[in-house]
Amino acid sequence: MSPTALRIVTLVLIVGGLGPAALLACRGQAAERLIGLELVGATLLAVMLLVVQLSGESYELIVPTALVVLSFAGTLVFTRLVHEPDEEQEEGDQGDR
């Protein structure tokens, strides 16, 4: 694939994929925001891989690889923070104090 075609694909992916994903990550219920967050991470990964392909430097592949790990860990943290505790657990915690 020619460098010009890769640049066009990258721009289309940024505009067509990252915009709606960021919008989804900023609005709605917690589950919808989580899906948007995952979609932003996947879109950024694809954009970074295309940029690495354009540059031709193989050592730059470490950045998308690290993004995959951090995106997964971020999703786990976000899910943990959004989780609402059960009423029984809240009552048990209040009785201990």
Image: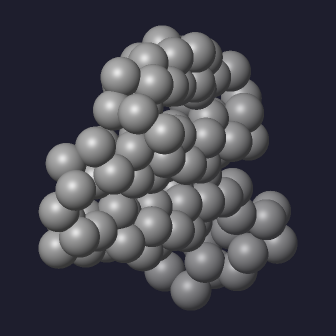
Q: Which residue is at 49% across, 80% downward?
A: 97
Q: Does residue 48 sit above or below 61 in this rendering?
A: above
* Left or right: where 57 falls relative to 64: left
* Left or right: where 18 falls relative to 30: left
Q: Residue 69 appears at what percent x and percent y?
A: 42, 74
Outermost residue, bottom direction? 96
Front residue of this view, candidates 91 and 86: 86
Front residue of this view, candidates 4 and 63: 4
Q: Which residue is at 56% across, 86% downward?
A: 96
Q: Would residue 70 be seen by someone viewing this image from the given angle?
A: no
Q: Does residue 89 sit above or below 11 in this rendering?
A: below
Q: Does residue 95 sit above or below 78 in this rendering?
A: below
Q: Residue 42 appears at what percent x and percent y?
A: 55, 48
Q: Which residue is at 70% across, 63% downward?
A: 85
* Left or right: where 85 falls relative to 97: right
Q: Which residue is at 44% across, 18% downward?
A: 8
* Left or right: where 90 falls relative to 46: right
Q: Would residue 28 be seen by someone viewing this image from the given angle?
A: yes
Q: Residue 45 appears at what percent x and percent y?
A: 44, 51
